[in-house]
Amino acid sequence: MTLTQRRVAAAQEMRALAHPLRLQLLELLGSEGAFTASEAARRLDETPANVSWHLRKLAEHGFVRQQEARGGRAKPWKLIAQSLTFGEDAEDQTAATALTDLVLEREFHVLRTSLRQQSAESTLWRDATAVLQSRVWLTPGEAKEVGERLREILVGEDRLDRNQEPSLRPPTSRLMALMAWVVPYGEPTAGVTTEVSA
């Protein structure tokens, strides 16, 4: 499966995403596959009416859509794009900053919760857990290469199909949260060039 991506720049789209339940719904659909509103409500401990309303809001902005009904039953919802990106081309930088803060805080919550629960995990899963942090001097080219390598690991197409198709998941597999960033540390340094002259 090829990773489907969407660049989000419109302020209305960013505001539509900047809701904790909507982010949970996108995460659920992205990692578990299609769900009806009732199924998603049970998974997220929400009411079907509330989940259905938020799914319709996401659909208004083209983030999700309903599939054909399963044998006359309720229509499941699915993602339109597996990866959403946004940044410096946003119409409203305030909306982009708020959305970024919300997404990062959700990820930090996942990390904190997992680390608090480590003592309850089996040795196999404790050994499979890694929290890495580093400061490294890199050129722009090296930083780009590191980012590209991390991207291959985080969204490798050989594993993407597992998110949408449960039958492809190995019996011992478990949903894991992965996050990485490669960003300049500290303030921009005056006089540092980004090009090498001959």
Image: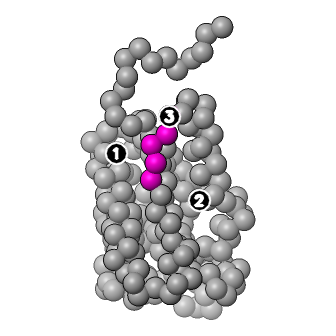
Circle 1 sits on which residue?
96
Instruction: Name the N-terminal-most of marks 3 and 2.
Output: 3
Per the image, label 2 sits on a secondary structure element best described as helix
Left or right, 131 with respect to 2, comes to left
Would you say residue 187 is visible in this rendering?
A: yes
User: Distance between the Cα atoms at labels 1 and 3?
Assistant: 28 Å
Residue 91 location, x and y as percent? 36, 37
* Amino acid, disc 1: Ala
Quadrant containing the N terminus is: bottom right
User: Which residue is under mark 3?
Assistant: 137
Nearer the observer, 86 or 121: 121
Residue under the image location 47 percent in, 74 percent down: 28
Q: Are marks 2 and 1 in contact (CB under 8 Å)?
A: no
The kind of residue tagged 2 is Leu
Say above or below: 165 vs 4.
Answer: below
Badge number at residue 60? none
Residue type marked 3: Trp
Instruction: Report if residue 62 is visible in the image.
Output: no
Q: Is residue 84 left or right of residue 50?
A: right
- State the image coordinates of residue 92 (x, y, percent, origin top left): 31, 39
| Rendered view: 160 above or below 196 | below
Q: Say few, some or many: other residues with alpha carbon within 10 Å of mark 2 (under 14 / 14 to 19 / 20 or more).
A: some
Q: How is the image coloured?
A: one colour
Q: For the magenta stretch, what is the residue range?
A: 133-137
Q: CA distance from mark 2 to mark 1?
A: 23 Å
* Residue 134 falls within the magenta-colored stretch: yes
Location of the C terminus by quadrant is: top right
The residue pinned by badge 2 equals 154
- Report the mark closest to the observer, 3 or 2: 3
Q: Are marks 3 and 2 in contact (CB under 8 Å)?
A: no
